[in-house]
Amino acid sequence: MTAPNVLLASKGHPFQREPFFQMFDAFQQESHISGWTHVEQPAAQVFFNPENAEPYDCIVDYSMPGVFGVGGPPDPPQELKDGYMRLTEEGKGLVMIHHNICSWPAWEEYAEIIGGRFFYNPGSLRGVDYPDSGYLLAANHTCQVVEAEADHPVVEGVDLEFELQDEIYLAPYFEDSLVPLVRSDFDFTYKNFFSPSLVVNDGRMYERGDWTHPPTPNLVVWAKNYRNSPIVYVQAGDVPTSYNNPNYRKLLSNAIKWVASDEAHAWARERNAATAVS
């Protein structure tokens, strides 16, 4: 297949721009992608529909709209929701990175699109109430390719075990709709994490107070479909220790190529059709 042309969306969460963008320059220089266009929130929202996304083979979403007043209110306008529905019905490939899982916290369907949700404040999903999620910055952990999915194109050429230092999340994910690709050896229990609500509401970093959280899956990379769109979520991506990690770069470039491929689109359509029948 021809190397994909990528639309990259950002803004809503701070990141180190130069090393992050250098990674995409390297992807282009190495012919993993044919080119990339960067757009920030809220301007990025005009591309989440089939008409304006048409020039791009996939969208890489590194933005965090609907949080802290960036990109609009927590519940996006109906026009944008409709754009997402039409975009995913058409089957545009999506790669969603790190803090993108926090986006649009008052729109439950966004959690269904990406496969879960990080809560800055307590909320609910699928009728279940959750406390605010957990965060841990600069966590050193070992990532392990899921043995049953070792032949998946997203993990092709990735070491079966590799080290990362990055932020990790304690948050609910919908394992029933995900294809697990990479897990972490980290212990995802609340005593190893901190409360984001204490940060955003009280300015208290690295504290728990009386906060607790149920254990969550140790998934850090997964594939899924939403309607006819193939989707990959990669949890790492907070800092240059990941941007410059060869295995992380391989994962991300593989994910971009896969969601843009005919193979991934056929896979997503088949899964969508099977869900509709069931």
Image: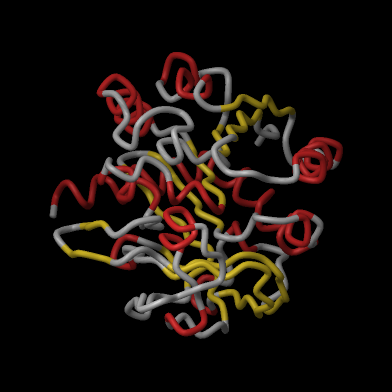
Residue 205 at x, y percent in the picture = 56, 65
Percent of width and height locating residue 183: 53, 75
Residue at left offset 43%, top offset 83%: 189
Q: Quadrant of the C terminus?
A: bottom left
Residue 264 shows up from this direction: yes
Q: Nearer the viewer, residue 59 or 69?
A: 69
Q: Nearer the viewer, residue 137 or 87?
A: 137
65, above or below 47, in the image = below
Residue shown at 49%/38% (left/top)?
93
What's the image's color scheme? Answer: secondary structure
Residue 32: % across, % down: 75, 41
**Quadrant that contains the N terminus:** top right
Query: Would residue 6 appear left or right of 27 to someone viewing this image?
Result: left
How many numbered marks have been drawn onto this rendered protein structure?
0
Vertical position of residue 50 compared to residue 68: above or below: above
Coordinates of residue 217 in the picture (x, y in percent): 41, 75
